[in-house]
Image: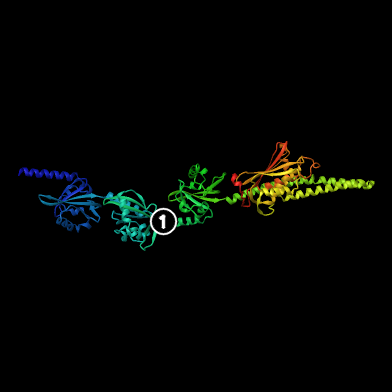
Amino acid sequence: MTDNTSDIKQTDDRFRQIVEAAPNAMVLVDKSGLIEMVNTQAEKIFGYNRADLLGQSIDCLLPERFRHHHPEHRASFFSDLQPRAMGIGRDLYGRRKDGSEFPVEVGLNPIETEDGIKVLSAITDISARKRMEERFRLVVEAAPNAMVMVDKSGLIEMVNTQAEKIFGYSRAELLGQTIDCLLPERFRHHHPQHRASFFSDLQPRAMGIGRDLYGRRKDGSEFPVEVGLNPIETEDGIKVLSAITDISARKRMEERFRLVVEAAPNAMVMVDKSGLIEMVNTQAEKIFGYSREELLGQSIDYLLPERFRHHHPQHRASFFSDLQPRAMGIGRDLYGRRKDGSEFPVEVGLNPIETEDGIKVLSAITDISARVKASEKLAEHHDELERSNKELATFAYVASHDLKSPLRGIFQISQWIEEDLSNGNAASIPSHMDLLRGRLLRMEHLLDDLLAYSRAGRLEGGISQIDLGVLAQNIFEMQTPPDGFKLTIADDLPIFTTLATPLEQVLRNLFTNAIKHHDCLTGNIHLGWQIKNKDYYEFSVSDDGPGIPSAYHNRVFVMFQTLRPRDEVEGSGMGLALVKKIVETYGGRTSIVSDGKRGTSIHFTWPIKIDGKVSIANNAQAKL
C-alpha cells in the first residue's frame, strides 16, 4: 500500500506541475462545479489568489448573465464525457475579481481521479485577438468598396455596408449564404472550380484578369465589377476576403471615350508603354488599310516605314519620360505605312492617357497627302509666278528696245521719204518704201512671236495618241526645208498618249531653228530619244551646223536673243525661248550639248503622262 500511495502522489505531483506550467489559465472543478485546482495563469487573468478560489463555485468566474444556465451546460458535459470547446457559435466571457469582463475561449477535458471524474478547463484570454478582430471588422466596414469574406466552401461569413448597398441585400440576408447568390447565373457553374484554384495557390490576385466580370443585385440586375481576392488566416482556417468594386461609372466613361475616339475625323491609335496597340478607330482602319483585328496587340511599328522603326523606341521612351501633349516629329517629315506597303505623309499628335493599367499614349494621326499636294501645287504656282514676273520684266525690256527698234527705223524712213518729196528726188522713194514695208513686216513678226510666246503652255487641243516618228516627219515636211536638208529619226520612237499641239510647237521650232541658223546649203537633222526616268522621256534634235559656245548656252533661251546680227538671219530670236517655256510648263527641262565648234543638240524632257493619262510606249517598254 505504501508503494502504491507513493506512485499516486508522484503522478499527482506531475499532473500539478503540468497544469502549473500551462500557458493559459487552468481550472479543475468537480461535478458540482467546485474549484479544486487553479494555476498561476488563472490567478493572473482573473485577479484572484489561489486561496480565494479553491473550494468556490466556478460561477464566481462567470458574468451574472451566464450563471443561470451554467449548471445545465455542466450536466450536459458530464453526460457525454468528451473533450470539447465550450460555447461554440457564441461569445464567452470571464469575470475578474474587480467585476470586469473579458472574452475567453474555453476547452473542456474530463479527468479521471480517485475521487471521480473532474473537468479541467483551459481558459484563454482572447481580448487581444478580439481587439484585432474588431479593428479588422472596422477596416472592412470602412472600406470604400464592397467587402465579402467567405470560407473554403463559399459560404459568406462577413459583409460590409458597401456590399449591402451595391448588391441590395441586408447583412442578415447574406450571412451564411453561398457567394453564388451574388453572381449571374451564367458564371455560377464554373465558380467552384475558380474557388478551388484560388485555395490551391493562396496568393492575392485580381479575379478574372482579361475577361469582363459582373455582379448580380437582389433585383436580378447585373453590373460590371472588379474583384480582388486576398487569403485571410483565421482561427477557423483560411478564408477569402473579396474586395468588389462597382465599375459601372468607369465603364460608362470608357464607353464615352471609345465613342469619342470612334467619331474622331482622323485616325486614333492608343498604345501602351511597350508600343503595343490597344485601341484603333474606323479612320485608322481606313487610312492604313488594316482591319481592327489585325492591329490590336501588334506593335505600332507596323504603321511606320522601315527607315523610321529603328529610332522609334527611343522617341517613345523620350515621350514617357516627359508626359506632355505634343506634336510628334516637329521640324521633320513623317510618314505612315499602309498595309500594301505604300507610304503617305502624316501629322501626329501625342496625348498621355491615364488608365487603370497605367499610362497609355493616344496618337491622333492625320493623313496630310492632300495638303502636301496643295503645298507642292502652291510652290509650282509660286515658281510659275516668278517665271511670269521674269517674263514680264523681259517683255518690258523688249518693248523698250526690240519693239522700238523697227519703230525708230520706220520713223527714220518716213523722214527720208519726206525729204525726197521736198527735194523732188522721187527715184529713191520706192527703195525707201521697200525698207518701210520690211520694218513693218519685222514688227508684225515680233508681235506674232510675242503672241505665240504668251500662249505657250496652255492646254491647246485634246489629249490623243501619237506616233512620234510619223508626227516629226510630217512637221519637218511642212517647214518646206531646202532641198539639201534631211531629217533622220531614231528607231522605235514611242507611240504614246499626250497633248499633241504643244509637242508639235516644240518640234516645229527646233526644226526651224536648226535650218535657219545652219551655215551651209545642206544639212542633217536628227531626232533621238531615251527614257529619262519613270516619269519622263528625253528627246533631242541635233544638227551639224555651227556650234554654240558654252557661254551662250543659257542666253539662246531668252526672248529675242540671237547670236548673229538680225540683218544676217531672219527671225526674232523667239524660237528657243518658246521651246523652253512650253517644255517647262509641262514639268520638263531644256539643255544644250555643243562643243562650240560644230554641231548642236537641243535636249528636252517630256512627261510620259499628262493629266493622269498614262502614255503607252509600245516598243519603248522593251528598252526598259
Residue extending farthest to the left is 1
Q: How is the image coloured?
A: rainbow
28 w.r.t. 600: above or below: below
Judge by depth and name the residue closer to the eye, 296 or 352: 296
267 w.r.t. 308: above or below: below
Residue 458 place in picture, x, y as percent: 69, 52
Residue 574 place in picture, x, y as percent: 75, 45
Q: Amino acid at mark 1?
A: Ile
Work out which quarter of the rendered image holds the C terminus and state it: top right
Residue extending farthest to the bottom is 219
Would residue 583 be found to the left or right of residue 160 on screen?
right
Q: How many marks?
A: 1
| Quadrant of the image occupied by residue 12 | top left
Would residue 136 be found to the left or right of residue 454 on screen?
left
Residue 402 in sight in this render: yes
Judge by depth and name the residue closer to the eye, 614 or 121: 614
Would residue 510 be found to the left or right of residue 244 on screen?
right
Residue 23 place in picture, x, y as percent: 21, 45
User: How many other residues sit within 10 Å of disc 1, few (<14), some (14-19) or many (≥20)?
Assistant: some
Residue 234 place in picture, x, y as percent: 28, 50
Would residue 24 be found to the left or right of residue 531 on screen?
left
Q: Dot 1: what SS?
A: loop
Residue extending farthest to the right is 424
Give the residue number, with chain letter if any, for mark 1. Answer: 247
Judge by depth and name the residue closer to the eye, 535 or 39: 535
Work out which quarter of the rendered image holds the N terminus and state it: top left
Residue 388 in sight in this render: no
